[in-house]
């Protein structure tokens, strides 16, 4: 599903990469291949016009843009999870 030309499935990948700060560990977390996660990162970089994660020494660091997205993406996914998981109360009266 797309919203403003963004594949919303990429938000789950973005969240994992922002938390893990590592493409391979994010791929493991989501049970996908490293190449699938790298592809997702490429599409996210294109969409946001920002590298999001950059190699610094042996690790990766978040760009300022990624830092601003981190909490918002986590909040959006948390709200979505709550909305989907919440069962409506049924009152037969």
Image: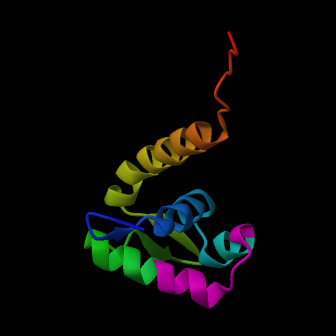
Residue at point 60%, 76% (across, down): 23
Viewer-proximal residue, 55 or 40?
40
Residue at the limit of the structure toward the front, as seen here: 93
Residue at point 29%, 73% (across, down): 47
**How many marks overall?**
0
Residue 27 at x, y percent in the picture: 67, 75
> If the image is split into quadrants, where does the C terminus sit?
top right
Q: Is residue 8 above or below residue 71?
A: below
Q: Quadrant of residue 6 in the image?
A: bottom left
Q: Which residues are magenta?
A: 29-40
Query: Is residue 23 shown in magenta?
Result: no
Q: Quadrant of residue 83 in the image?
A: top right
How are the colours assigned in the image?
rainbow
Q: Is residue 74 above or below residue 60?
A: above
Q: Is residue 71 above or below residue 18?
A: above
Viewer-proximal residue, 27 or 85?
85
Answer left or right for 51 relative to 29: left
The main secondary structure of the magenta stretch is helix
């Amino acid at each position: 599903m797309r919203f403003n030309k963004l594949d919303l499935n990429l938000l789950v990948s973005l969240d994992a990469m922002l938390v893990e700060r590592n493409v391979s560990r994010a791929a493991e977390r989501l049970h996908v291949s490293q190449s699938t996660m790298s592809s997702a990162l490429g599409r996210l970089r294109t969409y946001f016009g920002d590298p999001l994660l950059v190699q610094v020494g042996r690790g990766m660091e978040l760009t300022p843009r990624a830092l601003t997205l981190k909490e918002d993406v986590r909040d959006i996914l948390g709200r979505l999870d709550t909305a989907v998981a919440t069962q409506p109360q049924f009152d037969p009266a």
